[in-house]
Every structure is written in structure tokens, then in C-alpha cells.
């Protein structure tokens, strides 16, 4: 079985069992954090087997330190005490430097990646209620010119954080609501008391994925949502043992239509103030 971004909804259907017995012949960052979250949720994954190359990859990406010359970001924890912007910048530089792009495209792609990763990490801290913080892992695929990132937590899920304010009835409704602009389950206050532009992160990520023909995947407790080609599909598993939230996404520089500055103006500024006019918050 391939634990890939495209295949994870199929795998999710069987995650309600108390244990998983499977053979993994390919795994991506999303698959790693998925299995980690299942394990944290009490699912026995000890019977999963894999060929040596997959085992070696998992050992490396879970135990290696981040550094030059690597096309992956090792499994990394972050919390409210973590400087999200610093981690996002380090991750971005390491991942994008492995892609063969001209200098202008490389720097522009870094802006896309840095924004997407930092917003998803912040979203986890804002919404999860997780006592263990969050986890992030990434991988670049130079031959495809693509990158993939996955961020997860072992918190309460999206419905629990959005239900009071927006009246969502289930995790599926909560996922769709979270993808709308200006939707947040937390107060838009930064670490120093400043007002943040809360509720833009997942909306902006959805816009990036749609414009770049990428893939977005969100799991919240018993529901998984996959978005590709501007279309979303759900898989609901009522007895799922998965507890928490997972956000994974993949896109490539070759598919970016706008420069990041143009993208901000078209999607983010209008979402922030409803006019399309620039507001200084980057």
C-alpha cells in the first residue's frame, strides 16, 4: 500500500480498527504524520511492515537533524513557545534550495512555501487545544519540481473549536467552514497582545492549491477531506480511532500562475479587509 497524499482517503476508511496490519511500499510525509497521530490515538501500528528502503527513510526522517544537502525536513515538534516564523523560514530555505529554479522563481516560491507552512503551523496552535503542540515534516521532489508538507496535532479537532461560534454539526462542516476567509476558533491576538489576521491561513492555502493545481488534504477526527482540481471530496468514518487534525499539501513552482505579491493582492488582501487594498501584515 502506498501511504501517499492521493491514497490516504482510501487508507483512512480502515483506520477505525484497533490495529493496522499493512505492508507499506511507499510513504510520503503525510503518511508518516498520519501513522504518528494514529499511534498517539491508541492504534496499534506495530504490525505494519515495509521493505528496507521504506524503513530506512522512516528512520532517517524521524531521527536526522535538519541541515544542508537534504531534500527533506525531519519530523519536528513545535509548541506555543516555538518561534513559528523562524522554523517556517528554516524549513522553506532547506526544501526549496533543492529545486532547480532560476533565482527569481526560487525566491518567489520561497514566499509561497514560507507563508503556507507558517500559517498552517499557527492554525494548529490556534485551533487544536493540543497539549503536545504540533508536528511538521516536509519533502521536496526535485524531479517533479514539487514539495509536500504535513502538519498534525493530537488535539480536539476542528468541530470542537468552531462549534460554539459557527454552529457546525460535524467535522465535515467544520472543515468547510475553516476553509472560508475570516473563520477562526481563537481570538486574533498575537503573543505580545497585537491583533493578528486570524482566519486567513487555511483559506489562503486553499487558494494556493487551487491556483497551482496542487493537492490539499485535511483530517479532523473521523473525517478526511481531499481537494484537487478545485473539487473537494469527503470520507467519513464514524468509528475512526484517529484523534486530532492533520493538514497536508503538495504543489509545484511550475504551476504558480501569479507572483506571490500578485497572489496576496488577489486573494489575501481582499479577504482581510474586503476591498482588495493592501494592508501591512506581512
Image (cartoon, grey):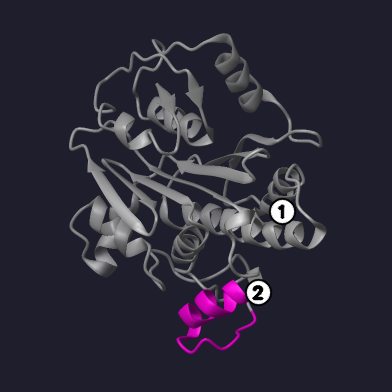
Which x, y percent locates residue 61?
A: 63, 27
The answer to whether residue 58 is visible is: yes
Q: Nearer the viewer, residue 111 or 259?
A: 259
Q: Is residue 110 left or right of residue 251?
A: right
Nearer mark to the viewer, of 2 and 1:
2
Residue 270: in magenta span: yes
Which x, y percent locates residue 263?
A: 58, 72
Which x, y percent locates residue 44?
A: 36, 17
Q: Main secondary structure of the magenta part?
A: helix
Q: Is residue 167 left or right of residue 50?
A: left
Determine the residue positioned at 45% across, 42% down. 153
Determine the residue positioned at 53% across, 78% down. 266
Question: Who comes first in sequence, dot 2 or dot 1?
Answer: 1
Helix, strand or loop status at disc 2: helix
Helix, strand or loop status at disc 1: helix
Q: Nearer the viewer, residue 173 or 196?
A: 173
Which x, y percent locates residue 117?
A: 59, 53
Q: Distance of mark 2 from mark 1, alpha carbons?
A: 18 Å
Determine the residue positioned at 54% across, 52% down. 121
Quadrant placement of the C terminus? bottom right
Q: Is residue 231 above or below residue 140?
A: below
From which residue to which does the magenta span run? 261-280
- Give the residue pinned by disc 1: 89
- Give the residue pinned by disc 2: 261
Amino acid at each position: 500500500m502506498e501511504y501517499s497524499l492521493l491514497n490516504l482517503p482510501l487508507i483512512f476508511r480502515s483506520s477505525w480498527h484497533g490495529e493496522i496490519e499493512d505492508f507499506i511500499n511507499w510513504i510520503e510525509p503525510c503518511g508518516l504524520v498520519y501513522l504518528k497521530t494514529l499511534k498517539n490515538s491508541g492504534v496499534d501500528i506495530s504490525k505494519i511492515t515495509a521493505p528496507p528502503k521504506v524503513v530506512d527513510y522512516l528512520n532517517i526522517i524521524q531521527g536526522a537533524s535538519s541541515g544542508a544537502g537534504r531534500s527533506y525536513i525531519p519530523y519536528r515538534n513545535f509548541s506555543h513557545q516555538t518561534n513559528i516564523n523562524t522554523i517556517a523560514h528554516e524549513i522553506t530555505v532547506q526544501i526549496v534550495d533543492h529545486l532547480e529554479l532560476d533565482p527569481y522563481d526560487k525566491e518567489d516560491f520561497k514566499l509561497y512555501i514560507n507563508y503556507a507552512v507558517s500559517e498552517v503551523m499557527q492554525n494548529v496552535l490556534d485551533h487544536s487545544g493540543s497539549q503536545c503542540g504540533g508536528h511538521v515534516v516536509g519533502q521536496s521532489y526535485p524531479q517533479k519540481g514539487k514539495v509536500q508538507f504535513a502538519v498534525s496535532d493530537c488535539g480536539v479537532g476542528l468541530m470542537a473549536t468552531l462549534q460554539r461560534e459557527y454552529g457546525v454539526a460535524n467535522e465535515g462542516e467544520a472543515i468547510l467552514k475553516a476553509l472560508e476567509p475570516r473563520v477562526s476558533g481563537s481570538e486574533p491576538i498575537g503573543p505580545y497582545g497585537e491583533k493578528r489576521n486570524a482566519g486567513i491561513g487555511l483559506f489562503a492555502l486553499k487558494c494556493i492549491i487551487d491556483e497551482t493545481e496542487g493537492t490539499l488534504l485535511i483530517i479532523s477526527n473521523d473525517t478526511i477531506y481531499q481537494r484537487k482540481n478545485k473539487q473537494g471530496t469527503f470520507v467519513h468514518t464514524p468509528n475512526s480511532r484517529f484523534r486530532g487534525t492533520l493538514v497536508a499539501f503538495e504543489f509545484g513552482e511550475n504551476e504558480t500562475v501569479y507572483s506571490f505579491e500578485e497572489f496576496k493582492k488577489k486573494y489575501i488582501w481582499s479577504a482581510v479587509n474586503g476591498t482588495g487594498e493592501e494592508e501591512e501584515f506581512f
